[in-house]
Each structure stands twice: as C-alpha cells, then as structure tokens.
Image (spheres, rainbow, N blue to C red):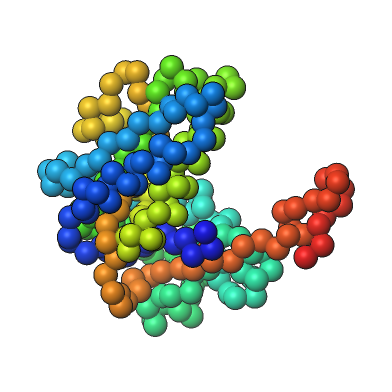
Amino acid sequence: MFARRTTNGPFRPDPVRVEHQHLLVRVAGAAPSHFNSQPWRFVLVEDRDTIDRVAHLSGDSMRQLIERGVFFERYRKYFRFTEAEMDARRDGIFIDHLPGPLRPFTRQVFSDAGLSVMRRLGVPARLGRDNEKLVAGSPLLLAVLLDREEYRPGELSGFYSLFGMGAAMENVWLTVGELGMGIQFVSTPMEIPEAWAELARVLRVPDHLELMAVYRLGYLPEGQARPSIDWSSRHRKRLSQYVYRETCETPERD
C-alpha cells in the first residue's frame, strides 16, 4: 500500500495481457459494496481508434483548461514550491523538476502573469499535445461506470455507490504495481462538460449507466527519465494533522 504510485510518464507499447486485464477487474469486483450491490461496471478499451479519440479529447481539454486559466485557478492551492513548504503542509504536489531556465521563476510560472506569458509562447497547445500523446501511447484504457439504479446522487445509495467504486479502484491501483504496470487518471475531459459528454458517446454509454472515470494503464518501462516538468506527491500528513483522539478537540500525538 505504501508503495502505490501514479504514473505520469509513458508506458511500454506492449499490449496488456488478457489475464492481467481480467485480474484487475476481478480485484475491483472483490471490493465491498452496500448489500453486495456491486454497482460498478467497467469497459476495457484496446481499440486504437477509440484510444486515439479519447487521447484527442484529453489533449484538447488540457489545452482549453490552460488557455482559460481554469486549471491554475482551480488547483493553485495544491502547488508547493519548496521542500520546507511541502514538509510543513504535507499535502499537495511539490513542483521539484523543471527545465533549468525555468527554475528561478518557478512561482511566477504558475501566477497570472506567468499564465499570460505561457499563452503568448503557445504553452497551452504544447501541453495539450503532450497530454494527447501520453494517452494515445497507452495500450489500455479502463472506463469506470456506475449503475444508475444504485447511483442516485443526493440519496444514501449515491454515497454507498461512490464509496464502493472508490474501494474497487483502490484494489486496482494496488494490484497494478504487483504486475509491473502503472495507472493514471485521465481527468482533463471531466473538467469540461462537453468533452465528457463526447467521451461518453465514444464509449456508447447507455442511459442506465453513468460514466464516472477513465484511467490509462500499461506496463512500465525500465529506467525511464522523468518528464521535463514533473512533481512529487509522496508526502502524507502527520497523524496530528488528520487524526483525533476521543473527540475532534484532541489531535492525536505523532
């Protein structure tokens, strides 16, 4: 569990073995669910045309998010720029890997002024292309859906369904490492409603199911260099920052 990782870089081009695909969805199906309702459904995607279409939606969504400033406005509070800041907060992502010329201006890169400069330099389009290439190079996509009979937002069944889906995906996340694989959430289409609706059409999601998430998976290459812009998120909060003893008035001692 402590060795769990998210893969930010590319995968090997090798197809994911069918027995590994089936193992992943079987461990997902072994997760707990309310009254054993098993509300989750999964789509395993290997078709190259479909992956390319999802990749285009992902890359274009990234471009739009950066150009509009939505990405930085929404997630700026999670950026950390020094080891001391990361050690104090113990959450968010530590931007610890940037091209040499950008390192003295790390904080400015993620500011409003920095965003203006990035627009002029065409950085949103570049990041979009990089994101598209990353998804397109994935040998397997895994779409996660919930049965609307169980998933009813605003009702307890909606909470139970999300709880069960989270447990199912954690099982998958813990298993990929044992198979020499990696996994990453393909999140950017979800940030733009029209892109997410198009993705649901690409996957031909029927009315009785709700598309919840898409992940990219594959086998990990050996000795891969870090991307030019990368981050670390291995820090976790200390017990005193998220655990209480007896009541919410007494933080647990570290």
- Which image quadrant is residue 237 in? bottom right
At horizontal 49% and vertical 65% (from top left) the residue drawn is 3
Q: Position of residue 61 (x, y in %)?
A: 31, 45
Residue 62 visible here: yes
Q: Residue furthest bottom?
A: 100
User: Quick check: 91 left or right of 211?
Assistant: right
Residue at image point 13% right, 47% down: 48
> Is 202 in front, or is 151?
151
Counting every numbered tag in the picture gives 0
At a point 85% along the width and 44% down the height, the residue shown is 247
Residue 13's spot in the image, x, y percent?
A: 17, 61
Picture quarter containing residue 119? bottom left
Relative depth, front residue between 225 and 254: 254
Q: Nearer the viewer, residue 167 or 225?
A: 167
Q: Name the residue at 51% across, 31% down.
A: 33
Residue 108 visible, this orientation: no
Where is residue 11? Give x, y as percent: 26, 62
Check the image and report above or below for 8 versus 212: below
Residue 189 at x, y percent in the picture = 34, 42
For the C terminus, give its image quadrant: bottom right
